[in-house]
Amino acid sequence: MMQETWLHPKDFIYPIFVAEGENIKNPVDSMPGVFQYSIDCLDEILEQVRESGIGGIMLFGIPKHKDPQGSQAYAQDGVTQRAVRFIKEQYPEIYIVVDVCLCEYTSHGHCGMVCGEEILNDETLPYLVKMAVSLVRAGADMVAPSDMMDGRVAAIREGLDQAGFTQVPIMAYSAKFASAYYGPFRDAAHSAPGFGDRKSYQMGCANGQEALREIRADIEEGADIVMVKPALAYLDVLKEAALTFDMPLAVYNVSGEYAMVKAAAANGWIDERRIVLENLTAMKRAGAKVIITYHALDAVKWIV
Ligand code: PBG
Ligand code: ZN
């Protein structure tokens, strides 16, 4: 009766990696229980998602062809666009969020356009807009820009509105820190940068006040949900954001956080179920309305 925080299946969004090709179900070594699926193999996981009653899924596409402009990110028949169309047709009740970023699609692995070794902020915006619009046209319910270019929320909002998608919300990765916790994801999504790092566009982990400024900027640009990422090492930022802004907050419990729990559990060093529920409860207690997590399907079984 006195418990303040309860987890609910609708809190969770489950990330899914969709690879171009056929007959693919590749385990991601650093993320036990997570696979890359080709579209023809998605049914297995989508049926579990439907059964689970979670809030939605978040799609990451892995194209066969990469080029400097990331053209498969906004191609009409790109792997992510096709996946969205397939899911909307076969599983209309599943809420589809799409990650909007170029790093899985560019040959250099950066989240935007590059010139030499420099990442070009403003030149990247039109590509992100094209990607967002094409995915919504394919049937995506919400877009989640994760690239961290300045001004992208306003640009995407305008692009969606002009294309007639005024009602489609934007979940902005607002306070996204340059983090070693993304390591396993980059294996899963084949998106490691070919040179340098993401520190010119993602945030330094030492800066909490700057994180609040980034969140404020995204709210002013029209974000509907703002995100803090990663989760566990940044719950202070999440809490401060919850106290500062009158906005729904999301948190991304990222790949490295998942990998650490799975590795320790596989060794019998921790109780996986208890650790996962403790971590997820802490995220909600700190202020998260939405929790994006690879544990989603397990957690749902554990909270009932
Ligand atoms: C793409 C993107 C990343 C993640 C989500 N979207 C990787 C990155 O920025 O390098 C990380 C998710 C995770 O680690 O689980 N920009
Ligand atoms: Zn990226």
Image (spheres, rainbow, N blue to C red):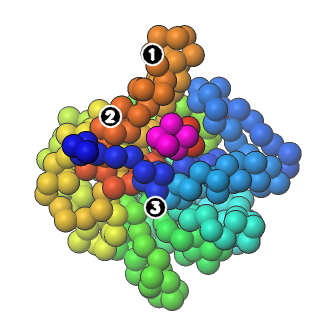
Residue 270: mark: 1
Kindly identify the amino acid type of the residue bearing the numbered disc 1. Ile
- Magenta: main secondary structure equals helix
Farthest right residue in view: 23
Q: Is residue 107 magenta?
A: no
Closer to the camera: disc 2 or disc 1?
Answer: 1
The x and y percentages for residue 147 are: 43, 55
Confirm or reject: label 1 Cβ below 8 Å from ligand 1.
Answer: no
Report whether residue 20 is seen.
Answer: no
Q: Earlier in the sequence, mark 3 or mark 2?
A: 3
Residue at label 3?
144
Q: Earlier in the sequence, mark 2 or mark 1?
A: 2
Q: Earlier in the sequence, mark 1 or mark 3?
A: 3
Give the SS element for disc 2. Answer: helix
Contact flag, marks 3 and 2 (Cβ < 8 Å): no
* Other-residue count near label 2 (Cα within 10 Å), few / some / many at <14 / 14–19 / ≥20: some
Residue at label 2?
232
* Other-residue count near label 1 (Cα within 10 Å), few / some / many at <14 / 14–19 / ≥20: some
Kindly identify the amino acid type of the residue bearing the numbered disc 3. Ala
